[in-house]
Amino acid sequence: MYDFRPAADCPKPEAYRQLLEAAEALTAGEADGVANMANIAALLWEFLPDMNWAGFYRMVDGELVLGPFVGRPACIRIPLGKGVCGVAAAEATTQLVADVHAFPGHIACDAVTNSELVVPVIRNGEVVAVIDLDSPSKARFDEEDRAGIERLAELISERI
Ligand code: SME
C-alpha cells in the first residue's frame, strides 16, 4: 500500500521535498511512461491543495495531446503556441499565470479555473510533455511551486 500524503500543516518546501521523494520512489525502475505519468498526476493531486486539475499533455507529432490527469475531462489536442500549455511547450519555458482570464488565448477547459502553472518536461533539449496544474483560486501558484514542479519535471524527464 502506498500512503503518500503530507501532513495537513506541512510547510510548502517540505511538501515538495516529500513529493519529489515519492515521485522518485514510484517511478524508479519503471519504464512505462503512461504508468509513471498516471502516478505523478495522482501524487500532485494528493500533495497540492486547492487545485481542480493536475496532469500531463504530451508532445505528439508537433502538437500537445492530453495525457494522464486528475480532474474533469479536458480538451484533447492543443496546438503549439495556443493557450497556456501551448505557449509553455512552444517556448520551452514555465508559465506561471496568476489570472488565466488575463492570458491572451487561454483555453478554458473548465470554467472554474482561475490560475495555472505549466512546466515543460525537457529531454535531450526537446519538450516531450508539459505538466499542467489548474486552480480555482487566483494567484494560487508561486515561485516555490514553480521551483518544485520544475524539479519534478527534471526528475521524470527520462521516465515518461
Ligand atoms: N487551460 C489550458 C488548457 C488545458 S486545461 O486547463 C486542462 C491552456 O490554456 O493551455
Image (spheres, grey):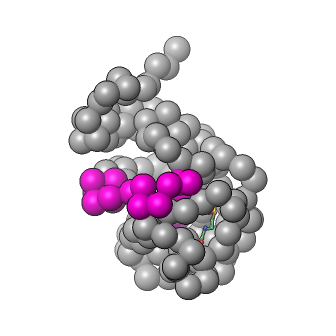
Q: Which residue is drawn at the image coordinates 66% and 46% (left, top)?
A: 71
Q: Which residue is drawn at the image coordinates 56% and 54% (left, top)?
A: 136
Q: Is residue 54 visible?
A: no
Q: Is residue 59 visible?
A: yes
Q: Can residue 81 be found in the magenta stretch? A: no
Determine whether, in the image, residue 72 is placed left or right of residue 36.
right
Pick the residue in front: 32 or 149: 149
- Residue 147 in percent (x, y) is at 28, 57
Pick the residue in front: 112 or 123: 112
Pick the residue in front: 11 or 21: 11
- Residue 152 in percent (x, y) is at 37, 50
Q: Can residue 136 be found in the magenta stretch? A: yes
Pick out the residue farthest to the top.
1
Q: Which residue is drawn at the image coordinates 49% and 44% (left, top)?
A: 50
Quarter of the render that holds ligand 1: bottom right
Res 20 quadrant in image: top left
Q: Report how many numbered discs are placed on residues in the image.
A: 0
- Residue 40 in percent (x, y) is at 50, 42
Q: Which residue is drawn at the image coordinates 75% and 53% (left, top)?
A: 73
Pick out the residue farthest to the front.
138
Q: What stretch is highlighted in magenta?
A: 129-147
Res 149 quadrant in image: bottom left
